[in-house]
Amino acid sequence: MGIRKYIGTKKFYKMVLAIAVPIMIQNGISQFVSVLDNLMVGRLGTEQMSGVAIANQLIFIYNLALFGGLSGAGIFGAQFAGKGDNDGIRNVFRFKIYIALTVLAVGFTVLCFFDEHLIKLFLHESEGGGDLELTLKYGHEYIRILLWGLAPFALAQMYATSLREVGETKKPMVASLIAVITNLVLNYILIFGKLGITAMGARGAALATVISRFVELAIIAYWSHTHIDKVPFFKGVYKSVKVPRTLGIDIAKQGIPLLFNEVLWAMGMTTLTQCYSLRGLPVVAATNICYTISNLFSVIFLALGSTIGIVVGNLLGAGKLDEAVDTDRKMIAFSTFSCLLVGGLLAATSGIIPQLYNTSDEVRRLAGTFIIIGAVAMPVDAFCNACYFTLRSGGRTKITMIFDSGYTWLVMIPITAIFAYLTDMPIVTLYIVSYLPQIPKGIAGFCLVKSGKWIKNLVDD
């Protein structure tokens, strides 16, 4: 078979893209607005941009914790969908309610009472750095407003993930599109003070985000409960909040490792950023610009990874194990090679986007260099991401946890921290060093996927 076993038919790619493209569009629009949001705040100066960037690093942990918890339940949702079991999907959704409320309670408490202490971890004096006290003030104000958006975001994700698991990817996309347009318009009005409204700066960006979260929830919940013919599992979903004991235990067994994995991984990425921040506030601002732009291009492989979880999960739930293996192999290849092109496009922006920010030449130069490094690493990131979703689709969440967050904390962070804290290594060299462990991680992912230990039907009974 040779290389042919990695290449699908026209029908195959049409099927994959039918699921992946709406997710790409939804995430792409969100990230594009995030870029514009970032640019608007960036026009206010380095301190406001850095304060918001640090605050978003903390919110990022909450978002990933929610994603991890819902993903554990989503493994069963996708497999129940492949089996055509609406009662099973309905019970999975009910379990998601408990997950969302738990993550919300913990996230709100931590961000409400410890936000200033956490923000200070990223603030370090450096030659040519900005005003650290002012940066802390902006970050604190931003989080205080954004706290009100945690609940609607959690509820919207409950609906969106369940719709995607049954193949309804367009409706979450539409809800997200309307929400981000709302966010964009309100950003312009509130940040800069248009239409007679007093300019709010970074606080305006936070308020716009909160309002857009409520808009997204209203749209997606309304559609779900008024189109029972298309999503019958929502019928009577709130008549009871009971979940069959056996199913609840099974979901918890799969979901708890994923929840901890996402929290640990997000904390790991935040810790890496904190290591970079030892080189000064300009580095914080530069990494913020880099992450914002890189995330826009990363939606390609992230969407394809989510599609692997849905398609392969459906096939495993339907008992089509051989087809699941063949499909997974072709989707991993598609995701990896697509990002060779996407990485090239990302590198092409490295000298353009940073110039749009109202910041120092040093920050712009560093941001451009960081973007190029991320672009070179993107195909490897895509492959690792595809392996992650493959392992997850069959419920191998403990192995997934070791492969993802375990590797981050046991390998990537120690290497980066040693050079960050114990040497005077220049930030660009440090940034490259922190990326190098992704190569052996990709090799490990290849071996785990090839072993076939992830090929498992979880809902056969």
Image: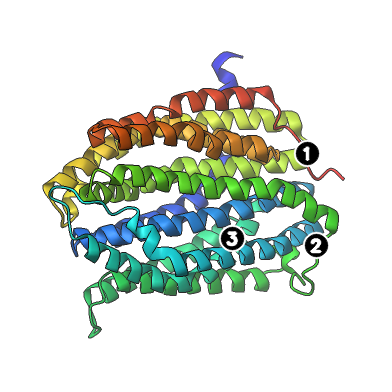
Could you tell me how far apart the alpha carbons at marks 3 and 1 are, in whole angstroms? 24 Å
Residue at disc 1, secondary structure: loop
Q: Amino acid at mark 2?
A: Val
Please give the residue where the numbered disc 1 appears in the rendered image: 457
Q: How many marks?
A: 3
Residue 1 lies, with reference to residue 206, above or below; the image says above
**From this viewpoint, is residue 81 visible?**
no
Name which residue lies at 73% across and 58% down. 92
Question: Mark 3 belongs to which amino acid?
Answer: Ala
Query: Which x, y percent locates residue 185?
Result: 32, 71
Residue ID at (25%, 62%) = 135
Q: Which mark is residue 160?
A: 3
Circles 2 and 3 in contact, beta carbons < 8 Å? no
Distance of label 1 from label 2 (alpha carbons):
20 Å
In the current view of this chain or complex, which residue is farthest to the front? 422
State the quadrant of the C terminus.
Answer: top right
Instruction: Examine the rendered structure and indicate whether residue 234 appears above or below residue 446.
Output: below
Q: Upstream in the sequence, badge 1 or badge 2? A: 2
Quarter of the image with the N terminus in it: top right
What is the three-letter code of the residue carrying label 1? Asn
* Residue at left offset 57%, top offset 41%: 16
